[in-house]
Image: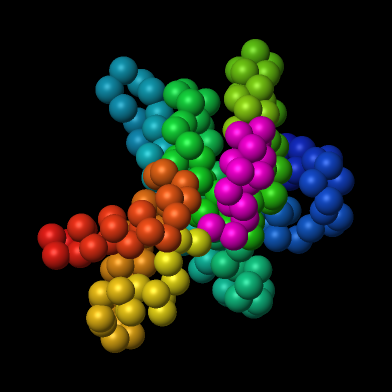
Amino acid sequence: QHSLTVVAQAISLEPQYGFDRDLTLRLAALLHDIGKPATRKLEQGGSVTFHHHDVVGAKLAKKRLTALRFDNDTIKAVCRLIELHLRFFGYSDQQWSDSAVRRYVRDADDQLMRLHILTRADVTTRNQRKADRLAHAYDDLEARIKVLAEQEQLDAMRPDLDGEEIMQLLGIKPGREVGQAYNFLLELRLDEGSVGKDEAKKRLLEWWPNR
């Protein structure tokens, strides 16, 4: 019943985010809690937990959707949404740093708008007082994403140096080491925003010998 309610809520939210009869979103809403039965655990005191049902659910959904012969892009998108559908609840408990907000956007990537809808649809099925509190928290998260996007062009998150500049600076050839340097600079960008090319070069040269 809960999953069907989430589907209905997601459908009602589609126009607000520019979607219409979106199959990917509706599949994610239908299957978002598919991992709960496999992760259900009765704790001491009688409480029930579903730890990691997001990750387990994504794997189960991939298996089911593959068996039903959905295309790979749809399967990948649905599974990503299921995997991320609980991430926001950490924000509702304690407001994130800017770097955590950037990671949320990066991890959602091109599924961010669908994740907004799925999360809001899931939130609205809870008791009204809690639903209102979570909805206000998500309003705040979306507002912060918008501000950061305007400040840093968050939609196209990239390090301050590209692969060619990294290789030239470090005197290395294409390969695993370039990826290591790129990831270091990406983490720097996520943590501090754009620091500029000169500062990025300085930080990379300081980090590189001690990696």
Residue 148 makes an appearance in the image: yes
The residue depicted at 45 percent of the width and 40 percent of the height is 100
Residue 113 among those drawn in magenta: no
Q: Which residues are magenta?
A: 142-157
The residue depicted at 41 percent of the width and 44 percent of the height is 192
Rendered image quadrant of residue 178 = bottom left
Position of residue 21 measured from the top left corner of the image (x, y, whole percent): 84, 56
Residue 151 among those drawn in magenta: yes
Above or below: residue 30 compared with residue 197 = above
In the image, 11 versus 169, the foreground residue is: 169
Q: Is residue 194 left or right of residue 151?
A: left
Position of residue 53 measured from the top left corner of the image (x, y, whole percent): 44, 46
Q: Is residue 184 left or right of residue 59?
A: left
Q: Is residue 20 left or right of residue 48?
A: right
Image quadrant occupied by the N terminus: top right
Identity of the residue furthest to the bottom in this view: 173
In the image, 203 versus 153, the foreground residue is: 203
Structure colour scheme: rainbow
In the image, 52 versus 38, the foreground residue is: 52
Tally the numbered discs.
0
Position of residue 69 measured from the top left corner of the image (x, y, whole percent): 64, 77
Image quadrant occupied by the C terminus: bottom left
Residue 4 makes an appearance in the image: no
Rendered image quadrant of residue 155 = bottom right
In the image, 81 versus 65, the foreground residue is: 81
Above or below: residue 76 compared with residue 99 = below
The residue depicted at 66 percent of the width and 40 percent of the height is 146
Above or below: residue 97 compared with residue 77 = above
The residue depicted at 28 percent of the width and 55 percent of the height is 203
Identity of the residue furthest to the left in this view: 210
Dominant SS type (magenta): helix
Identity of the residue furthest to the top in this view: 129
